[in-house]
Image (cartoon, rainbow, N blue to C red):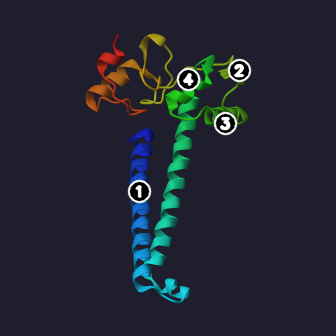
């Protein structure tokens, strides 16, 4: 299983767990409130004797934990995705990149500035455009190797990620008709022009 597929499967499972713990938290708080209303305790200390109180707190902690895991993996995935997108271009408009990656432009700027500070990118952001004199061959997300020849390269219509044409065709034929990166519907007719 490739890294991208593994990250997406793990993220999906973590999102389900996040939703489950949030729903459990709401349900337990509702049960706790109903119980308090029905029993009408005179001493507030009684609240600490209710099992629902402790389980609701546990569900809240687990919800926050999975929320933070999902947020971190989204940022890490976005960082690699943006890096792979801009490394092969001389000029990249920040606004258009933000729209294609479903992020706010300020996050894209922060990610690019972080990549520049790590010396993974060399260039600058000026007037809403990232520009670089040094570019390298883009990497195919399926085989993780550079795409040296533009005649064997194709792009996803949605996220604009480059692929080896034959690798993407094989993927669409054998696995599913979705982009392996952005998971939006992609057919052979979209890439063979």
Q: Nearer the viewer, mark 3 or mark 2?
A: 2
Q: Earlier in the sequence, mark 3 or mark 4?
A: 4
Element on which disc 1 rests:
helix
The answer to which of 29 and 11 lies nearer the viewer is 29
The residue singled out by tag 3 in the image is 110
Residue that appears at 30% across and 27% down = 172
Q: Estimate the spatial distance between the alpha carbons at disc 1 and disc 3, rounded to whole Å.
A: 29 Å
Q: Nearer the viewer, mark 1 or mark 3?
A: 1
Q: Which residue is mark 4?
A: 96
Q: Is residue 30 above or below residue 38?
A: above
Q: Identify the residue at horizontal 48%, vertical 77% (top origin).
A: 54
Can you identify the residue that label 2 sits on?
Answer: 127
Where does residue 87 sit, x and y in percent of width and height? 60, 24
- As drawn, 35 above or below 25: below
> What is the spatial separation of the Cα atoms under label 4 and label 1, in whole angstroms?
31 Å
Quadrant where the C terminus sits is top left
Counting residues from the start of the chain, the first of labels 2 and 4 encountered is 4
In the rendered structure, are the residues bearing label 2 and label 4 in contact, judged by CB atoms less than 8 Å apart? no
SS under mark 2: loop
Between disc 3 and disc 2, whose residue precedes? 3
**Position in image of residue 174 (x %, y %):** 26, 30
Q: Residues within 10 Å of mark 2 (few under 14, many from 20)?
A: few
Q: Name the residue tied to disc 1.
A: 19
Asked whether 10 or 54 is in front, the reply is: 54
Give how far across and how far down residue 34 sits, in percent.
40, 76
**Residue 38 appears in view:** yes
Q: Residue at x 54, y 85 (%)?
A: 44
């Amino acid at each position: 299983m490739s890294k991208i597929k593994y990250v997406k499967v793990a993220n999906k499972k973590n999102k389900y767990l996040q939703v489950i713990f949030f729903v459990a938290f709401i349900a337990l708080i509702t049960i706790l409130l109903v119980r308090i209303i029905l029993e009408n305790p005179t001493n507030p200390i009684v609240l600490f004797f209710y099992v629902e109180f402790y389980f609701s707190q546990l569900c809240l902690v687990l919800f926050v934990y999975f929320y933070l895991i999902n947020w971190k993996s989204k940022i890490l995935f976005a960082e690699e995705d943006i890096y792979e997108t801009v490394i092969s271009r001389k000029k990249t408009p920040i606004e258009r990149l933000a729209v294609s990656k479903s992020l706010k432009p300020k996050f894209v700027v922060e990610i690019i500035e972080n990549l520049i500070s790590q010396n993974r990118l060399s260039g600058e952001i000026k007037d809403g455009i990232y520009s670089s004199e040094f570019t390298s061959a883009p990497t195919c997300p399926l085989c993780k190797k550079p795409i040296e020849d533009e005649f064997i390269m194709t792009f996803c219509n949605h996220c604009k990620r480059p692929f080896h044409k034959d690798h993407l065709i094989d993927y669409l034929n054998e696995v599913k008709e979705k982009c392996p990166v952005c998971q939006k519907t992609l057919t052979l007719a979209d890439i063979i022009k």
